[in-house]
Amino acid sequence: MNGTLALAKAEIARIRRNRRYLIFTVGLPVALYLIFAKQVKSSATVYGIPFAAEYMVAMATFGAVSSAFQGNAIRIAQERKDGWIRQLRLTSLPSYAYVVAKILASMVISIPSIAIVLLLGRFYGNVSLPTWEWLVIAIAIWFGTLIFAALAVAIGYRIDPNSAQPVSMLVFMLFTILGGIWFPLSGGLQTIGKLTPTYAVVHITTTVIQNGTVVWSYVGGVLIWLAIFAGLATMAVRATAETV
């Protein structure tokens, strides 16, 4: 386990030096919130809550999902091609160490983007909530990173590096659009969006803000998607066990 944690620590250090990570997972959601949070009238509501609050959870989710998914899928595909995973298998590390380290690193590096956007919501967007609601919101969004970290493993193990970037970008855009992160959904698009994990994560948070309660059907949806993506990741790793 110590080796796995050391590998995760090294991965975190590498990502922290990556400007792409800083720009897209921290800088972009923060900039968007600063630009748009006060461009809409304070009386405007989305999904029954103030726009500043809804946009806060949307941007926090965007940053968290981006940090867990986009870079990881591409990086895993490249490291698989370069033989890095094969080299690790020649060491004394357990077979699961590489995947666990990637997921742990994703969980850690998503924290800054979530924390900064939520702090902006409180002190810039004037979003005022009970302490327990802030905690539920942060945990729900943070747990969402685990779902997409698992999906990143599945894509990274199955797809070559040249295809990993466009595939991961397409999947990312579909989940963010259909999850209602970029704009509120209605009609048929909302009907489709309700089936996505991003929609479930966003609406766990918005219903907590609106009603002060957790809608467990959304929590169930998140857990189902986690099981699906974890299953895909497991199958991908096993299918390529002899080739990487």
Image (cartoon, rainbow, N blue to C red):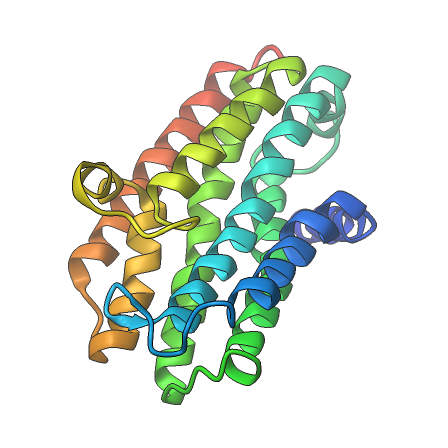
Left or right: 33 with respect to 234?
A: right
Residue 175 picture quarter: top left
Residue at point 28%, 49% (across, down): 223
Q: Is residue 152 visible?
A: yes
Residue at point 55%, 16% (across, down): 159
| Furthest-right residue in this view | 17
Residue at point 34%, 56% (across, down): 201
Q: Nearer the viewer, residue 230 or 133?
A: 133
Image coordinates of residue 1 in percent, x first then y, are: 62, 51
Residue at point 73%, 46% (across, down): 11
Instruction: Pick the quarter of the image with the C terminus.
Output: top right
Instruction: Please tell me how many numbered marks the rendered image carries.
Output: 0
Q: Is residue 1 visible?
A: no
Image coordinates of residue 77 in percent, x first then y, are: 64, 22
Q: Is residue 234 above or below residue 223?
A: above
Q: Is residue 40 above or below residue 146?
A: below
Image coordinates of residue 37 in percent, x first then y, are: 51, 68
Q: Nearer the viewer, residue 30 or 13?
A: 30
Image coordinates of residue 126 in percent, x first then y, are: 48, 84
Q: Is residue 167 above or below residue 197?
A: above
Left or right: 89 with respect to 221?
A: right
Residue 195 picture quarter: top left
